Amino acid sequence: MDIKVQRDSETTQTVEITIEESVVNKEVINILKRQAGSMKQNGFRRGKVPMQLLKKRYGKSARLDAINAAIDRGVTQTLGDKQLKSVIHISQPELIDGVAAGAVKVSFKAENFPEVKPKGYLGVEVLREKAKVGADEVKEELKQLQESLTQHAPVEDRDKVRKDDVVVVTYRGVGEGDITQIEQDEQSIWLGSEHLLEGFADGLKGMKVGTTKTIDVVMPEQFQIESLAGKPAQLEVTLKGLQTRDVPKLDDDLAKESGEAETLAELKKNIKARLKEQREKSHESAARQRMMKTVVAANDFEIPPLYLQAQCEREARQRLQSLMGYGVNIADLGIDLAQFAQSMRGDVEQSVRESLLLRAIADEEKEVKVLKKDIDAWMKERAEAQGVALAKFKAQFSDDEAMERLKSGLLLEQALDFVWSKATIKLVDEVPAEAPPESADAPAESEETSGDGEA
């Protein structure tokens, strides 16, 4: 096999391979022999059909199969050739010559990792918002806890609706078109909720159990049926029953029932600590993103164009598959995959640049490396989080390719942790919304810290 490599740019090579006709012909014979074992032909026993007859009848299709097999092997062999730089992506091979006869010639683009010499990643100044939790936030959490522990009891001494009742109703949309999609049987609705349809509670005033009434409402602005969003509508409502709410008091008994504390004071303390921990993680994640934008801005290098396009298309497909997982019919959305992929190009390019930079930083900093203990710790943590046996979880990475992907991902995480550990963190009350990522001159009341600074 002959291999020719032409350098097109820093990251792109045009590769042309020529596969000798004898190699293709040998593969054709192998394919025909395999077919002969199961082939029937009048006048011949199974497996005894002459090769000349097989070539005459099935030679063309066998040659196409042989060409595809030869190309696959040839491309795989080529990727290890010393003429090529480290390959990150290849294009679909194009058959140039040899369809009917002769040597097979194939051409494709091979893109390599760009040569990145990282700079500006040590001592990056980053704004990080202080993790603050207000008393009102704790109160809101307690309110939600109360709501989750609230019990409903049937009303037996009256049959008329009161303003704070829980009503059990069956309803349907009145009219034609999309409104007929609205239909619900025996749904419990608290009339004191902040999320009621406008006009719903007023329409049920004085209504008796067992009666039906048409009421006027206004649909939410963000309603899932777009043609009805924010529009007036009519619902035919049948009142099936009434219930009262038994809301638990904010006391030590509530704390015990929650399973989080023994006293109300302890529960409030735990809620505040939990909210603060969540906020700290959120603010650190945001600060890390700003840090990487700063590092990316300091490093200019060429991204392999076909690789970038492939990553955009991959991201687009994953998002569409995610929507399908929620029961969305993609065909109904009329989404053009190419346009959808192009719409997310900016975000994908930022992600690709960060990954390539972190890879280069890992190469530069020898302390950034993935050890067996790192892999073992990661697997144990993930297995426990998913509630599966460690051996079963490890089985997912039994092949070399899966393990290499895991090591690569862990290496990038370590590189990011390294850059973060060397950053200069400025704690501020609030990060300006329009602050450019490289700006770290906003006033900060707290002292500067390095690495994981805390409020």
Image (cartoon, rainbow, N blue to C red):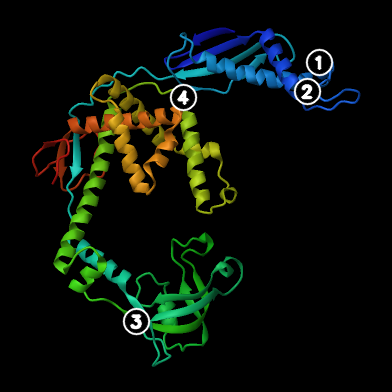
To which residue does mark 3 refer?
164
Disc 2 versus disc 3: distance between alpha carbons?
Answer: 82 Å
Is the residue under label 2 in contact with that under label 1 (CB below 8 Å)?
yes
Disc 2 versus disc 4: distance between alpha carbons?
Answer: 46 Å
To which residue does mark 2 refer?
36
Sequence order check, earlier mark of 1 and 2? 2
Give coordinates of residue 54: x percent, y percent. 81, 19
- What secondary structure is marked by label 4? helix
Mark 1 or mark 4: which is in front? 1
For image coordinates 52% across by 38% down, the residue present is 339
Is the residue under label 1 in contact with that under label 3 (CB below 8 Å)?
no
For image coordinates 39% across by 21% down, the residue present is 302
Q: Is residue 330 left or right of residue 56?
A: left
To which residue does mark 4 refer?
305
Q: Residue furthest right?
A: 43
Sequence order check, earlier mark of 2 and 3? 2
Give coordinates of residue 354: x percent, y percent. 33, 30
Sequence order check, earlier mark of 3 and 1? 1
Give coordinates of residue 191: x percent, y percent. 38, 78
> Could you say which is closer to the camera, residue 56 or residue 196?
56
> Could you say which is closer to the camera, residue 426 or residue 268?
268
Q: Which mark is residue 82?
A: none
Disc 3 versus disc 1: distance between alpha carbons?
Answer: 88 Å
Is the residue under label 3 in contact with that under label 4 (CB below 8 Å)?
no
For image coordinates 18% across by 55% down, the residue present is 273
> Could you say which is closer to the camera, residue 455 or residue 38?
38
